[in-house]
Amino acid sequence: MTRSILFQRRYANETKSKLSAIYRYWEIVSVLARRELKVRYRGSFLGVYWSLFNPLIMTAVYATIFGTAFNKYYHNSLWEYILSAFTGLAVIHFFNGATGQALGSIVGNGSLLNKIKLPISIFPVSIIVANTFQLVIGLLPLLIIVTIIRSPHLSSSINIISIPLPLLASILISTGIGFLTSSLFVFFRDLPFFYELIQFILMLTSPIFYPAEIVDPSIRIFLELNPLYPMIESLRQIVLSGNPPDSFLIFRSLLSGSIVLVIGWICFHWLSPKFMDLL
């Protein structure tokens, strides 16, 4: 009986210690995320709503240049093309912003790491959290409004509830890439130039400003290998189709995001012991 009580107490203490460590971790992450947003938008008039302004401007540019040429693939409706381009840009803009900023997060805080013992992973994670806050405040309300307009009354509530799922997949993949690139940047300082090329390739192979139907079937398979492809298609299906969410598309997007997250975390965990020698 005594051993059982001691075991229960020990287990309770270990659980309490782990929960306390998790709480401290996320407390530090929230502080860094708030600092990132304050520095980024200090003196700005629109603040976090600049995250909405960029995809809106890009959508207007694409509609002006390509709208007339491609609207036949969207039921001869320029409005359909605009909405399709915007939902695609919502995903790609978040991904590019979050991963591009996370890339330099560890090297940029090297002096702080040399002074204070902190979990190194908090720096890329805090960047993802800051950009997720922008996404939720800026883009998500507009996506919900479009979903309400496009969906029948009975399915609109289901679709609205489902919107966070492809967005969650985007957050997962951005976190995984953030872990990977931020750790590699410690060793390869030319990585930002190479990563800009990767971002450009991912954007071109994502059917954002063009319909996937115009791509030759023998080449279209390469579009589907793009990890952002199922997230863009899932978000479009939920927001624009007016039909109930496609569970297969949602599953594909979450699976793709989870795989990249696991790969990124494994690489980060493997490389992190060597960081302090190079910062």
Image: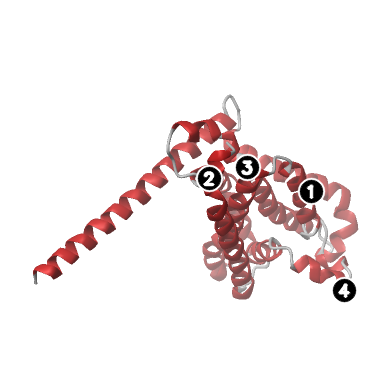
Single out the mark in the foreground, 3 or 4.
3
SS at mark 1 in the image: helix
Q: Which residue is mark 2?
A: 133
In-image side of 91 versus 35 (left or right): right
Q: CA distance from mark 1 to mark 4?
A: 24 Å
Pointer 4 or 2: first along the chain: 2
- Of 273 and 126, the residue lying toward us: 273
Residue 115 drawn at (x, y percent): 45, 31
Q: Which residue is mark 1?
A: 197
Single out the mark in the foreground, 3 or 2.
3
Task: Check disc 3 and give the amino acid type.
Answer: Val
Q: Which residue is mark 4?
A: 218
Q: Residues within 10 Å of mark 1 (few under 14, many from 20)?
A: few
Q: The N terminus lies in which quarter of the figure?
A: bottom left
Residue 83 drawn at (x, y percent): 72, 56
Q: Are marks 2 and 1 in contact (CB under 8 Å)?
A: no
Q: CA distance from mark 3 to mark 2?
A: 27 Å
Q: CA distance from mark 3 to mark 1?
A: 19 Å
Q: Residues within 10 Å of mark 3 (few under 14, many from 20)?
A: many
SS at mark 3 in the image: helix
Pointer 3 or 2: first along the chain: 2
Residue 160 visible, this angle? yes
Residue at the limit of the structure toward the top, as seen here:
43
User: Where on the picture, by quarter, is residue 246?
Assistant: bottom right
Answer above or below: position of 176 versus 43.
Answer: below
Pointer 1 or 4: first along the chain: 1
Q: CA distance from mark 4 to mark 2?
A: 39 Å
Q: Which residue is mark 3?
A: 186
Pointer 3 or 1: first along the chain: 3
Pointer 2 or 1: first along the chain: 2
